């Protein structure tokens, strides 16, 4: 199967790119203005125990687009041919300022996991406000260098606002129940270039039985550039909000 060297789409106000050498996907956004700075998000790879997806070669990378150029999708795959012998398949679906990520992690013949870390999400930019929705209300989180937020359950929603007015949101998919394992660890870390969201789904206790099942985990990302007004659905077309189940900017 032929593997694309690089795939680039312009979607809404951002540019999506992924290349076969790293398999790392990125959304780049321009805040605009005289002292324009670039924000965005980079989607890393999973860790099956101590084995990193990014150490395995990309075995599939292909793209699809609708005739009108409004909807795009990219699917990729890797096989960790050592240790856990898991296959990682990922689909990116883009529509306007929305990105849906579906990751399938399939157990091999001898695969067993002591822990599973989903793709880290690196939000590049000068973020001055972070809000977390964990099932009650949207709460402001004080940003400090290093780790500044930690929870044992995946947040339903994260919202980041940059100094220039860029807004980015992360939401867990409709499989929230699957991401609540009782031994998860979800944390936010600030560094000089942005904020990293780490997502450990589970950690087997010492002496516990390693996990041998397959996993499907979804995530949603959306963004809004400064001064942009959300588009209204006139009923003539399906928006990304409709297609992806209702994550939208307020």
Image (spheres, rainbow, N blue to C red):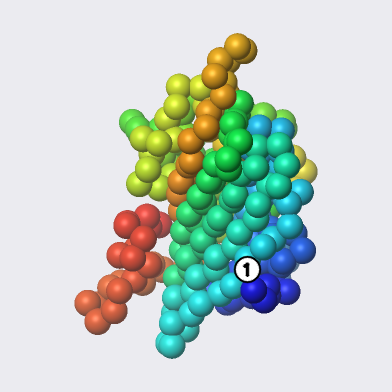
Residue displayed at 37% across by 43% down? 175
Left or right of 203 on screen, residue 126? right
| Tag 1 residue | 61
Q: Position of residue 34 (x, y in %)?
A: 70, 71
Helix, strand or loop for disc 1: strand
Q: Could you tell me if residue 224 is visible in this image?
A: no
**Quadrant of the snapshot with the C terminus:** bottom left
Q: Is residue 136 above or below residue 156?
A: above
Residue displayed at 73% across by 74% down? 5
Kindly indicate the quadrant of the structure image that contains residue 143: top right
Q: Which is nearer the eye, 246 or 183?
A: 183
Left or right of 154 on screen, residue 40? right
Q: Is residue 31 above or below residue 126?
A: below
Q: Which is nearer the eye, 18 or 134?
A: 18
Q: Which is nearer the eye, 134 or 76?
A: 76
Which residue is most to the front? 109
**Quadrant of the snapshot with the N terminus:** bottom right
Q: Position of residue 164 (x, y in %)?
A: 61, 58
Q: Position of residue 177 (x, y in %)?
A: 36, 35
Residue displayed at 56% across by 74% down? 63
């Amino acid at each position: 199967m032929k593997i694309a060297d690089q795939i680039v789409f312009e979607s809404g106000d951002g540019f999506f790119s992924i290349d076969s050498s790293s398999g790392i996907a990125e959304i780049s956004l321009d805040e605009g203005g005289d002292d324009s700075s670039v924000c965005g998000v980079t989607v890393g790879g999973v860790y099956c125990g101590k084995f990193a997806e990014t150490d395995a070669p990309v075995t599939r990378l292909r793209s699809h687009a609708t005739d009108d150029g409004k909807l795009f999708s990219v699917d990729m795959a890797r096989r960790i041919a050592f240790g856990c012998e898991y296959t990682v398949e990922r689909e990116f679906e883009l529509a306007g300022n929305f990105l849906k990520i579906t990751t399938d992690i399939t157990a091999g013949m001898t695969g067993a996991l002591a822990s599973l870390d989903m793709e880290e999400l690196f939000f590049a930019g000068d973020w001055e406000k972070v809000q977390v929705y964990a099932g009650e209300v949207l709460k402001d989180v004080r940003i400090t260098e290093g780790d500044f937020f930690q929870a044992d359950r995946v947040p339903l929603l994260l919202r980041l606002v940059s100094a220039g007015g860029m807004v980015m949101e992360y939401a867990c998919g409709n499989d929230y129940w699957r991401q609540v394992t009782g031994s998860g660890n979800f944390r936010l870390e600030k560094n000089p270039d942005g904020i990293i969201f780490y997502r450990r789904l589970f950690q087997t206790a010492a002496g516990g039985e390693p996990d041998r099942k397959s996993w499907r985990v979804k995530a949603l990302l959306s963004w809004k550039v400064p001064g942009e007004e959300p588009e209204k659905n006139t009923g003539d077309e399906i928006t990304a909000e409709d297609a992806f189940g209702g994550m939208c900017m307020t």
